[in-house]
Image: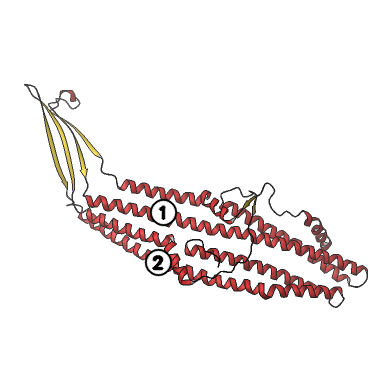
Amino acid sequence: MYAKHAVLIGLIMIPWWPSAPQGEELGLTRQDAIRIALETNSEVVAALAVSEAAKARAVQAGAIPNLQLDLEYEELPRLIDIGTFGERTLGATQAIEFPLKWWWRRRAAQLAAHATQLLVVEVIRQEISLRVKKAYDRVLFSEERLEFNRENLKVIQGFLTKVQLRREAGDVPALDVIRAEVEVGRSVNRLTQVQSDLDDARATLNTLLGRDLKTPFRLTANLDYQPSSQNLSVLEKLAFRRRPEIRGTAFAFASARSQQGATRASLFPDLSIGVFRQMIVASPGTESFWRVGFGLELPLWGGVGQRGELSEAKATTAQAAAEQIGARQQVLLDVERASLRLKYTEEQVQLFEGKIMAAAERAFEVASRSYREGKAIYLDVLEAQRALIEVREEYTTALFHHRATFAQLEWATGGELPYE
């Protein structure tokens, strides 16, 4: 009963099996997808906000101390009766930091802003680009699987019809018909799972593009194989030049050094200049005078705190230096790992294209012809059919892994790489 229902379901569903979400489908290239994601993805937007905050801190670090206005009343008969003062002084005081302290602090903040742009924004942009490439190729991969599973179901349905005709003629046992019906049911289930995987892949790509999960689109690329030839030493040099982690940690180290210089400069005194206008009410009349004052802020009582700040600045500089070395080592590891993986996936694809695919297709053709001629049993055909399905699945998976690994190598080197 189950087998007959599965056959009926398969025959009904195949002509109307959905290939994509309904609605207007716009063509989408891989580069279009990356561009849209870098403009709309929430992680990129958040990273840009972090970078803007760092730039704002750099502006704040260059600000000079506020001007202090002073108004003083003396010889008041009562505390709140300022209209009957005997002496009034109006003036302004401006603190002037030791120039090197201001310069180092401003430079440290500017370098930190550059480091943030690279280590936050550019790193996120590259990660999003990598995820979009893999998501885009996953949709292609799922579409390929859906297509050949459809074709497989049609083949099995056609074979079922032939088996049924031969059964009516008394050439094959009833067991062959049952087996063929079961295979149709299994193919329908497999097709349902592949369709579900495709829907999930399309939703994932839409999420990365910052769009509604069911937004329709049509991919314009194919999941094809393009051989590549990459030199490891060339890739490493390219990565050192382009990876944002390399340049970002360099800026972070320079910022820490500058902050250390600002901390040392804080041991020097700051200057303050005040200009005042003094009015004295005397019995013959009112007299006014100008007064100018100078002051030095001596860090006599803050030595312990400043020594602690200097120790902290040195430790931060050492940390930045270690992170810079670590970034270089990680880049080398990323490039070598992706390069080796790419070579392995290329060998897999070439093996499928050179031998395995052709052998599996030939085995199925031979088994089908032998069965039609009465020289083979149905189990031989079934085994050849299953082997062909598995090989096509494995070949498509190898193509997907090769493209994903090439995208990983592009991420490891900090940018696009040409196929050679």
73 or 112: nearer the viewer: 112
Q: Alpha-carbon neighbours of circle 1 within 10 Å: few (<14), some, or many (≥20)? A: many
Apparent side of residue 240 relative to residue 160 in the rendered image (left or right): left
Q: Quadrant of residue 117?
A: bottom left
Amino acid carrying label 1: it is Gln
Q: CA distance from mark 1 to mark 2?
A: 19 Å
Per the image, label 2 sits on a secondary structure element best described as helix
Q: Is residue 1 left or right of residue 209?
A: right
| Mark 1 touches mark 2? (CB < 8 Å) | no
Height in image: 183 above or below 299? below
Residue in the picture at 70% in, 70% down = 390
Q: The C terminus is located in which quarter?
A: bottom right
Residue hosting label 2: 326
Residue 80 lies, in percent from the top left, at 20, 26
Q: Is residue 200 left or right of residue 189?
A: left
* Residue 257 horizontal/vertical position (percent): 29, 59
Looking at this view, name the residue that lies furthest to the front. Answer: 420
Q: Check disc 1 and report the residue beneath it.
A: 117
Q: Is residue 79 shown above or below 304? A: above
Give the mark nearer the N terminus: 1 vs 2: 1
Please, what is the three-letter code of the amino acid marked with disc 2? Gly
Q: Quadrant of residue 114?
A: bottom left
Residue at horizontal 62 percent and vertical 60 percent from the top: 138
Q: Is residue 109 above or below residue 147?
A: above
Q: Please, which residue is most extreme toward the left here?
A: 284
- For mark 1, give the secondary structure: helix
x and y percent of residue 31 in the render? Answer: 56, 55
Residue found at the far top of this picture: 284
Q: Quadrant of residue 287?
A: top left
